[in-house]
Amino acid sequence: MLHALKNYFFFFFILNISTFSWSDEDPYLFIDSNAQKMVQVLTENFDLFESDRELYENKIKEIFEPMIDFRRVAASVMGKKYYLMASEDERAEFVNIFKDSLLDTYAETLAQWGDSLISTEFPKSNLNKEIISVEVRQTLDTGSSKYPISYKLRKSNEGWKIVNIIINGVNLGLTFRNQFQALAVSHEEDIETTLKNWVSDAGDAGIS
């Protein structure tokens, strides 16, 4: 699973919590500034992956967890049909399962990446403050190839949160939803059994 996820999960992690209020209000600055900060964090802590794996993973998890609207993403992954079929406890359980599976996998895959450059596409006009959802586009330059990344963000009471990512044309949210639906069908739409067998796997976007 780590090999399949390596090409996706780096992008989730190139984000950090900004200490500047302006980036909390502007999703483009939010993504750009935090992407550069996260690259620095990964570079400075690279050796910890081998010397102190737990400490390394905790540093990553502390950065990543606040950036994603896990509740909204998990509901989208389940899809309307299975979300409505699930009990409140099962919905809450899947949020935790989905979050933990991604956090654990992301932390392990990050150390395998070398230095990369990331550039953000900024709008030509000021952002309308009434907008609550936006798409922020970036380009990953690995030195040998360039890949497009599209972040879908939604503004909540807690600020901007990532709700989906499209990498090199691969829609992660849709990929996970299809996986959940296939898993549910294979378990005769038993939600409890489906949750117990959930393993996140985004496949391969062809990024290397």
Image (cartoon, grey):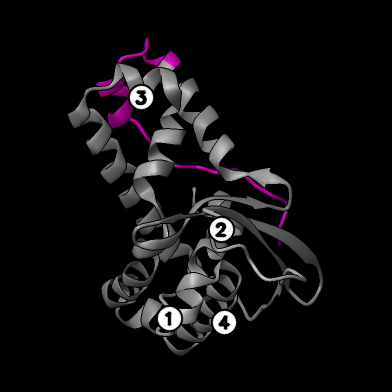
Q: Quick one: label 2, few (<14), some, or many (20+) residues within 10 Å? A: many
Query: What is the x, y in percent for residue 157?
Result: 34, 58
Between 31 and 184, the one nearer to me in the picture: 31
Q: Mark 4 points at which residue?
A: 36
Task: Kindly identify the amino acid type of the residue bearing the numbered disc 4.
Answer: Gln
- Can you give x and y, in whole percent of width and height, for residue 10 in the image? 55, 64
- In the image, which is nearer the foreground, mark 4 or mark 1? 1
Kind of residue sitting beneath label 3: Tyr
Does the magenta segment cover residue 198? yes
Q: Quadrant of residue 125?
A: bottom right
Q: Nearer the viewer, residue 157 or 10?
A: 157
Q: Can residue 15 be seen in this view?
A: no
For the record, the magenta segment spans 185-208
Q: Which mark is residue 83?
A: 3
Q: Which amino acid does label 2 sit on?
A: Lys
Could you tell me which secondary element the residue under label 1 belongs to? helix
Give the foreground label among 2 and 3.
3
The CA distance from mark 3 to mark 4 is: 36 Å
Q: Earlier in the sequence, mark 2 or mark 4?
A: 2
Q: In this view, does 194 lie above or below 4?
A: above
Q: Earlier in the sequence, mark 2 or mark 3?
A: 2
Along the polypeptide, which appears first: circle 4 or circle 1?
1
Q: Nearer the viewer, mark 1 or mark 3?
A: 1
Q: Which mark is residue 6?
A: 2
Residue type at mark 1 is Ser
Q: Distance between the residues labelled 1 and 2?
A: 32 Å
Provide the major secondary structure of the magenta segment: loop
User: Considering only order in the chain, which callout, 3 or 1, is on the residue closer to the N terminus?
Assistant: 1
Indicate which disc residue 21 carries.
Answer: 1
